[in-house]
Amino acid sequence: MTEKATIKVFIADDHAIVREGLKQILAETRDIVVAGEAENGLDAIKLFRKSECQVMLLDISLPDRSGIEVLKQIKKEKPELAVLMLSMHREDQYAIRSLKAGAAGYLTKQSAPKELVNAIRQVASGLKYISAALAQELANHVNDDHEAPLHETLSDREYQTLTMIASGKTVGMIAKELSLSVKTVSEYRARLLVKMKLKNSAELTHYAIKNQLIE
């Protein structure tokens, strides 16, 4: 494999163990090398500019900002970069939002190493990557005559707020985790309650559990 054919990958994930695991998997391939890494969104944006990567593995849940926010910023600066989103969330929760924001593909962290390697090679060649399970989910949506679920009307930040509240986090905890003011998070909460026609956090949590938006 020539240097020209080598796929350079940048890893952005806040868990050191996950990054090491990914690097170990990729070290076993001849055509893929890790060209850089970051543990939060800000570093991901800063450091990828200095790398010559063709593919970024981007965690959707970074400590300082949403992975989708980072994705949008990176795609503005380097539209040709193939970004493969990694997540602990079930595919149908965040995959469509990621793809709409410019991601080249979406994988859960439970995916097999072989699937990860195949996905990297596929997006590096300019194609999109989705798993067979997600392809089936998308096909089901196409043939569905019912209106879209209310949570699909939310912005990315409103949706993130919804899942965090439903997971038991207070507005103050969310504000600290996302580096936002309590007032801003409260506004997101108020807006999403109106959009979803819910009265309070208890109803919101019930909705999230019923629609399997949280584990």
Image (spheres, rainbow, N blue to C red):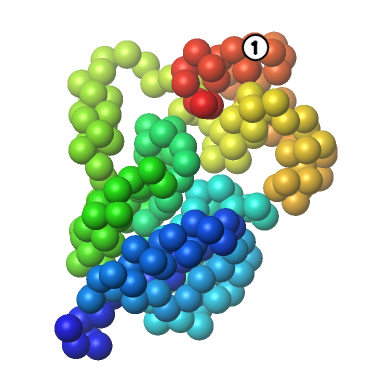
Q: Residue furthest left?
A: 1
Q: Residue furthest bottom?
A: 3
Residue 118, image x, y percentages: 22, 58
Eyeballing the image, is 169 above or below 208?
Answer: below
Total numbered circles: 1
Visible residue check, residue 70: no
Q: Residue at x 25, y 88 (%)?
A: 3
Tell me which amino acid carries mark 1. Glu
Visible residue check, residue 214: yes
Q: Residue at x 41, y 61 (%)?
A: 22
For residue 158, side relative to residue 180 (left or right)? left
Q: Residues within 10 Å of mark 1 (few under 14, many from 20)?
A: some
For residue 153, side relative to residue 161 (left or right)? left
Q: Residue at x 57, y 56 (%)?
A: 15
Residue 98, image x, y percentages: 41, 46
For residue 74, side relative to residue 82 (left or right)? right
Query: 1 or 98, which lies in front?
Result: 1
Badge 1 element: helix
Q: Residue at x 17, y 83 (%)?
A: 1
Identify the residue under disc 1: 203
Residue 214, image x, y percentages: 53, 26
- Quarter of the image where one finds residue 113: bottom left
Query: 39 or 134, which lies in front?
Result: 39
- Quarter of the image where one finds residue 155: top right
For residue 181, side relative to residue 155 (left or right)? right
Query: 186 or 201, which lies in front?
Result: 201
